[in-house]
Each structure stands twice: as C-alpha cells, then as structure tokens.
Image (cartoon, helix red, strand yellow):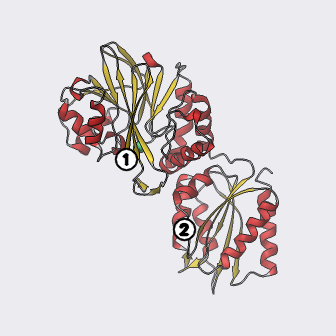
Amino acid sequence: MAKTLVKEVAENLYLLRLDDDEIKYFEALWHIPEGITYNAYLYLGPNTRILFDTWKIGFSSLFIETLRSLVEPKDIDAIIVHHMEPDHSGALKSLVELNPDIKVFGHPLVKNMIESFYGIKNIAFRPVRDLEEINIEDIKLKFIYTPWLHWPETIMSYLYSTKTLFTGDVFGAFSIPSSVFGEELTRDYINFMRKYFVDVIGYYRQHVEKNIQKILGLGLDIELVAPLHGALWKDIGRIAEYYIKWGRGEGVENKVTVIYSSMYGFVEKAIQFVIELLQSHNVDVAVYKITDNYRSEISDILSDAIDSSAIVLGAATYEAGVFPYMEFVINQLAKKANSPKPVIIISSYGWGGVAGKFISNILSKTKFKVLRIIEYKGMLTESTLKDIRSAVNELLKHVKT
Ligand code: FEO
C-alpha cells in the first residue's frame, strides 16, 4: 500500500513523499518491482507559502490530506510547476479547486498543458523566462530552463533562502529509498538512478550534458538537490558526474552486457561459450535472456547496457527476421542507449540465416559498431566455436581490460 512521508529537509522546507510500492510498470512500460516515490516540496516561511509540484494522478485526495497536515491548501501563495507529466501534476486540479487564486509559475508551455490535461482555465499563471529571478512576496527564486529533461516544458528552480535546487525528473531514481538523502544510500541506489535515467530520459540523452553544464556554470551555492523521485542530495558534484557519463553513454571499464533469446537452446549454447570466455578474462558480464522459462525486463537491460563497454547480442532467425522480442529490445537499445560501443551478433537458423543481417541493419543507423556477425546452422560446430573465440578476442580489445 502506498505510504506517505513528510519531513523537514531544510529550514522551513518540507518534503512530501508518496512511496508507491503498488505500481508494476512505470509509464505502463518500465518494470519496477522496487517501486518509486513522487516528491513534492512545500516552503512554509513566516510570510510566504510556496508549493513545488504535486503527486501522481490518482493520488489527489491523499496529496491534499498530506498537505493539510502542514497547511491549508487555500493559504498557499504559489505553486511552481517544474514538469507537467501527470506523475507530478496529478493533484493540480484538486489544488486549484481549493485555492482558485493560487499563483502558478512555470514554463510558458505549462498553461496550455494544464488546460488540456485537466480542463483548468482562468488560473493566475505567470510564465517564467530562462534564468529569470522572481520574488514571490519575500522569497527569491531563480528559474532555469532544462528542455527535454524530460519534456520540452521542463524547468528547474533555485530557492535562495534554503540554497535548494529543485531538479524535476533529473537526478531522480526508481525505488523507495530507506533514507531521504542519497549520500546515506548504497551503490544499489545509484543503479536505480541509472535505470530511471536510461528508461525515462534515455531518448533525450543528447540534451543531458549541456543542461547539466548549464546548471553547474551558474555558480549557484547549492546545498540541497531536490528531485521529483527518490532521494535528495547534498552534493551535486557526484550525481552530475554520473549524468554526464550516462549522457555520453560512456562504458565502465571491463563491463559487457550480453542479451539473448533462445527458443530451443541453440543460441544459448553459443552464448554460454561467450560468457565463459569473457569471464575467463575477468570481464564483468551482465546477462539478460529471453527463453521458454525466463524473460528479462527491458527496463533492466537498458540500464546495464548504457554503461557497458561492449554488447553481445544473440538471437535466432524467426519468420524471415529476428526473434520478435529481441527486435523490440534492439530497437529500444538503438533509441535509448545509442552509443559508440562494439557489438558482436550471434545467430542461429534452421534453413536460412536472416537475423544477423537484420540486427546489423538496425544498428547501422546508430552509433553502435558491429564487429562481427556469426551465424550458424543448427548445432554449434568446432568451426563456429573458433569464429566465436576470434570475435570475443577482438571484442576484448575494446573492453579496456
Ligand atoms: Fe517523473 Fe517525466 O515525470
């Protein structure tokens, strides 16, 4: 059951967190058994009350009830809308019904989106400009456009009084962290952050580095980073570094992701040979498979692929193409994890090999570099094993062992 958490995270600044452990597929796509949080924030100064975003659509009543534990919604002066995706704007309608005069600050695109998403008209909307500083009563804020992280209307804001940067989806993560602050969490949490990054923002990775550099270049004195999902951070440096690396698709030294499908075990045998060869060279191998008794999730596959140094793909020919689920995986890799990594393709067939060329054609439109295609008929032979060994040796040159 979803739980709420309210905590003062800086002087007069409260985190209102909804821990959603019932969701199975974020955006109806990304498998997240680890759950997710939706974070809103409330500044309760002596003279001014400002809300920063809300929660996911469907949780409006709980959001208003949680808000009321701190302040009456009608007494809030303003709301900052950093991002209109309904996992954050979902309680806007209830809020405006209770407080029709609330001032709404956001990117110019937001006004129209509020009307089209929620049928809310005649709000006191104030569009903000990039890098504009605005005083809401006695409280000073700076607004920063961060387009395509994750949507075109996405902005960040900086609250001078608490030195807090509200970052929207950026630096968010899947999972329900056991601590409010990221510095107190383990490496596993970084993996949930990486998974969120590539699954949700991966398609827009070309916009990541320039937006992160833009924020860092403003010289803001940031003591608290407050994203809309997951943990808050006191130090922006480490997480900004991760974002730049993931944005570039830089591979971690010595890491290879192997993804394969195998209907009857022919491809699996070849892939097992590849894995053994890689491990014999002390390579860290992340293995994902689609078989008759197991199906890895695309959300996890993409997460490991983004920071691997190389990729191995295995799939049989299927109906004059490639095994369908692998086609989906490869298309998503091409979209969300597209980066200059070497790839080996291993494929088997019954009477005519098509899959190798098929996969290679998809990857030819990306930054991935196909080193070798090894296709074989039916059983593995000594000659195919020799080809695989040679291909793996070539791959190892790119894995930085
Ligand atoms: Fe967390 Fe793009 O919404």
Does 115 sit left or right of 212 as displayed? left
Residue 379 vertical position relative to residue 242 in the rendered view, above or below: below
Residue 53 vertical position relative to residue 361 in the rendered view, above or below: above
Identified at 26% across, 22% down, the residue is: 77
For mark 1, give the secondary structure. Answer: loop
Does 314 sit left or right of 36 as displayed? right
Q: Which residue is mark 2?
A: 295
Q: Earlier in the sequence, mark 1 or mark 2?
A: 1
C-alpha span from label 1 to label 2: 27 Å
User: Disc 2 beta carbon < 8 A from ligand 1?
Assistant: no
Residue 213 position, x and y percent, is: 57, 30
Question: Residue 12 occupies which quadrant of the picture?
Answer: top left
Number of numbered discs on residues: 2
Q: Which residue is mark 1?
A: 2
Residue type beneath disc 1: Ala
For mark 2, give the secondary structure. Answer: loop
For the question of whether residue 135 can be seen, the reply is: yes
Residue 354 position, x and y percent, is: 61, 77
